[in-house]
Amino acid sequence: MRRSVLRSLTLPARRPGFTLIELLVVIAIIAVLIGLLLPAVQKVREAAARTKCMNNMKQIGLGLHNYHDSYGFFPNNGGRYSGQPFSPDTNGLRWGIGNATRTGKTNSGSWAFDLLPFVEQGNAHRTWPASGWDVPQPLFNCPSRRGPEARVVPAVDPLFSSFRYNPAGRNPWAGQTDYAANLHLLPQRSAVPTGQSNYAIKDVTDGTSNTAFVGEKSMDPRRYTTGTWWYDEPLYLGGECKGQYRGGFFLRPDRKDVRFENNWGAAHGAGAYFALADGSVRLVRYDVDQGDRPAGPPSMFARLLLFNDGLVLQID
């Protein structure tokens, strides 16, 4: 009796707990669950980004119709004007700057700048140097690609040193757009062979449901957030700077070294979204019949961009 009492007083009480093997098993289970959860979270995020992108383009399409109701035609991409405070340029090619007093057929900023009052962004539609140009415009950014952010333009392109920009570092330039106007329907003002820089609904003879207003423009992912202007000028600039429009007939997903200049594409996995002239938004897949055909009928993708060639779009 005495021994049992002494033993109970000297031996430590056993406490419940995990063994090392049990702990490793639990950690392994948690790692597997996280591995299964992350792809699902990424899919949810991408689905939300696609929905936001579609909504952005829907609002832009409605804004273009509101613009048309006010002026009787669609906007062009603007251009330089005599007496503007300064002339931004890329390798000496000079651009116009947005001016709220120059609208309609005399606009100096891009089509997107001219559209701001019609998408509830009238405060950002101001003449330089009034404040507002450093305010990001999330309506023009695809969340799958980049967020709205004011960026200072570098003096030299960080990827290709042969491209130089002015005014480097002068001001945080917000408003780079992931959505480009269809050059064939919303052309730049200074280089239209027919001299017509503003088209109207009546000119869309192929039908508004067969013609794109605006689409997602092709980009190299390395250029998303560099602030460079190469085919990605801010929407406050106008003229022949091609950051706000595209006229090519190729559609490609974003990737390193993609030939994005003047072409279309997106960061989405299946295809790119386009706002049509009837107000709808549709996804065009990367495997669509596409390309530039100098001879013979244009590709199906080209028919989406050409608005008066007499050929009807046939995309599933």
Image (cartoon, rainbow, N blue to C red):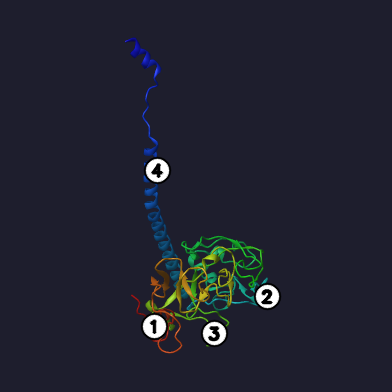
Can you tell which mark lies on residue 33?
none
- Considering every residue shown, the one lying at the far front of the view is 3
Q: Quadrant of residue 106?
A: bottom right
Q: Nearer the viewer, residue 314 or 106?
A: 314
In the picture as drawn, the residue positioned furthest to the bottom comes out as 295
Measured Cα–Cα span from mark 1 to mark 3 = 20 Å
Assign a secondary structure to mark 1: loop
Would residue 70 be seen by someone viewing this image from the given angle?
Answer: no
Query: Distance from label 4 to label 3 (Cα)?
Result: 65 Å
Label 4 vs 3, first from the N-terminus = 4
Q: Amino acid at mark 4?
A: Ile
Closer to viewer: mark 3 or mark 2? 3
Measure the C-alpha gap from mark 1 to mark 4.
Answer: 61 Å
x then y, percent, for residue 185:
47, 80
Tell me which label, 3 or 2, sits earlier in the chain: 2
Residue plotted at (44% across, 83% down): 203
* Pointer 1 local density, CA inside 10 Å: few below 14, some 14–19, many at least 20: some
Which label's residue is closer to the chain start, 1 or 3? 3
| Amino acid type shown at disc 3 | Val
Instruction: State the separation of the CA atoms marked 2 and 1.
Output: 40 Å
Which residue is denoted by mark 1 in the rendering? 206
Q: Residue furthest top?
A: 2
**Residue on which the image places disc 4:** 27
Locate the C terminus by quadrant. Answer: bottom left
Determine which residue is flagged by label 3.
192
The residue identified by callout 2 is: 83
Q: Give the farthest residue toward the left.
A: 1
Q: Amino acid at mark 2?
A: Gly
